[in-house]
Image: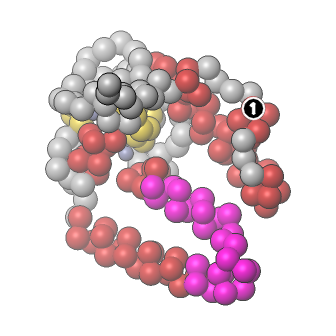
Amino acid sequence: MTREKPKNNYASFRKVKSREDFFSDWVEENLKQMKKSDKDKLYHNYTVKCKVFQRDGFKCQNTECKWPDSPLTFHHIKFQRNNGGWTERNGVTVCNTCHQAFHRCKRGLVFADTGYLPAHIRGHTFRETRDKKKDMKKLLVEMKALRKKLKYELKDTNDNIRLEYVVILLKWLEEDWDY
Ligand SMILES: [Zn+2]
Ligand SMILES: [Zn+2]
């Protein structure tokens, strides 16, 4: 008997959770440390992600995608570091494989000319052109600084890492390419 890995059907994105529901499985302690504005942001981003995934039919929108099982991610057309926002217009669903290849400048993102995509995405090809070397250097510097901070934190607080660092790490893991 073979056991199939359960397929992620993105249930939590198919039906938008209420704010209360969204935070209900968070650790109480972490929630308490969080500013209201950060919570607002997190919940807002979640709702935008729901709408974009739904609009895109829970499928990678890169027409050259060959990885139907790769997990879905949210790509910002205008990068967050260039003030690209969490809006439906600025978001598109791409799988993790296409997403990473794009941000590592290995492959482009080719979008179909379909009506549901925003006009500035529809039928367009995007390519990452930034200098990879320079960016890696920046990332390494950031990592080093974070490691130093974490070391101090761990010393001071009995192995409790402050939530803001957890958020930064999670951001890198999940959204790292659009920072
Ligand atoms: Zn893909
Ligand atoms: Zn991206």
As drawn, 133 above or below 41: below
Instruction: Report if residue 169 lies within the magenta region.
Output: yes
- Please report the residue visible at 19 percent of the width from the left and 30 percent of the height from the top: 66
- Helix, strand or loop status at disc 1: helix
Report which quarter residue 58 is drawn in: top left
The x, y position of residue 60, in whole percent, is 32, 28
Residue at label 1? Answer: 21
- The scheme the figure's colours follow is secondary structure
Badge count:
1
Please name the residue shown 24% across and 55% down the image. 104
Would you identify the image quadrant in which residue 176 lies? bottom left
- Place of residue 82 in the rendered image (x, y in percent of width and height, measured from the top left): 44, 53
Dominant secondary structure of the residues highlighted in magenta in the image: helix
Q: Position of residue 71 (x, y in %)?
A: 38, 36
Identify whether 175 is placed above or below 120: below
On-image quarter of the N terminus: top left
- Residues shaded magenta: 150-173
Q: Quadrant of ligand 2?
A: top left
Amino acid type, callout 1: Asp
- Please name the residue shown 36% across and 23% down the image: 59
Up the image or down, 11 lies above or below 20; here it is above
Q: Position of residue 74 (x, y in %)?
A: 44, 38
Instruction: Out of 61 and 123, give the one closest to the viewer.
Output: 61
Left or right, residue 64 beside residue 45: left
The answer to if 114 sits in the magenta stretch is: no
Residue at the spot x=17%, y=44% of the render? 107
Nearest the viewer among 168 and 117 is 168
